[in-house]
Amino acid sequence: MKNTLNNTKVLPIALAISSALSANPSFAQQADNTEVIQVSGIRSSLIESMDLKKNASSIQDSIVAEDIGKFPDQNVAESLQRITGVMIDRTNGEGSKVTVRGFGPKFNAVHLNDRIIATTDVGREFDFQSLPSELISGADVVKASRANISEGSMGAYINVRTARPLDNPGFQAAGSINAKYNDLAEEFDPKISAIVSNTFADDSIGVLFGVSVLDITNRIDSAGANRWAFFDAADTAFALRPYHRRKW
């Protein structure tokens, strides 16, 4: 009786194992046909920014473009000011330089794809007006030192990432045309940008082409003076005396 009972118990188990093994190919085939839903836009960029901050090895904040050619703002510096502890300086109303945790622009290291880029000023401060936002895919603000980043920053290490073709496989194209009007100059300033990318060889090789053209006409009315001196208005000889001969 014991042997008979053992056989009857083993048989269903064996049948279950064989049926499970025979069912695997059908499950795999169904998995291949599963539809993948990819989230894009603002929600996708916010999720990716949070993931970068969460997985960073030190204190870091990041900004990610909504899509190729769609950075949150017209200027990278104006996007960075959304991060806690980051303030910006403006030139003619447009964001140009950043201050992080109270340290001015010359105390922050700005790199492009982890490489040092030239500045337009005499010092180390970087002017973000020279970077077109349409060609930027994201930016990282590292507020704590790491062993794998370059030294030289007291406020923050800022790394700006450009768009790359392998990040968006397949053919991608985006462009924009806009214009600004300057009241003082009474001129329209056009801005044209375009970015095209494509991948080949099973998305292992990619090519990206980007261009941004901006023509600005500014007019700024200002007045200034220096080397003030007090003199008697009745002293006409002093007033008519050449500047280089005056004695203060």
Image: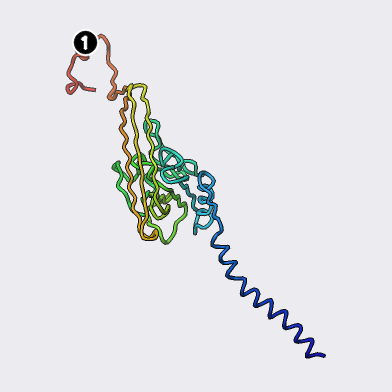
Q: How is the image coloured?
A: rainbow
Q: Can you say which quadrant of the picture contains the C terminus?
A: top left
Q: Is residue 94 left or right of residue 246?
A: right
Read off the residue under disc 1.
236
Front residue of 23/56: it is 23
Front residue of 236/25: it is 25
Instruction: Tell me which corner region of the image, top left, top right, bottom left or bottom right, holds residue 221.
Output: top left
Q: Can you say which quadrant of the picture contains the N terminus?
A: bottom right
Q: Residue at x 29, y 25 (%)?
A: 226
Residue 120 point in image, percent of width and height: 29, 41
Residue 164 point in image, percent of width and height: 38, 52
Q: Residue at x 41, y 61 (%)?
A: 148
For label 1, the SS is helix
Q: Is residue 1 visible?
A: yes
Q: Is residue 20 left or right of residue 228?
A: right
Amino acid identity at mark 1: Thr
Q: Is residue 214 left or right of residue 9?
A: left
Residue neighbourhood size for the residue with mark 1, other residues' Cα within 10 Å, grouped as few (<14), some (14–19), many (≥20) = few
Residue 16 point in image, percent of width and height: 69, 76
Residue 121 point in image, percent of width and height: 30, 41
Task: Relative to 49, say whether 205 is above or below.
Answer: below
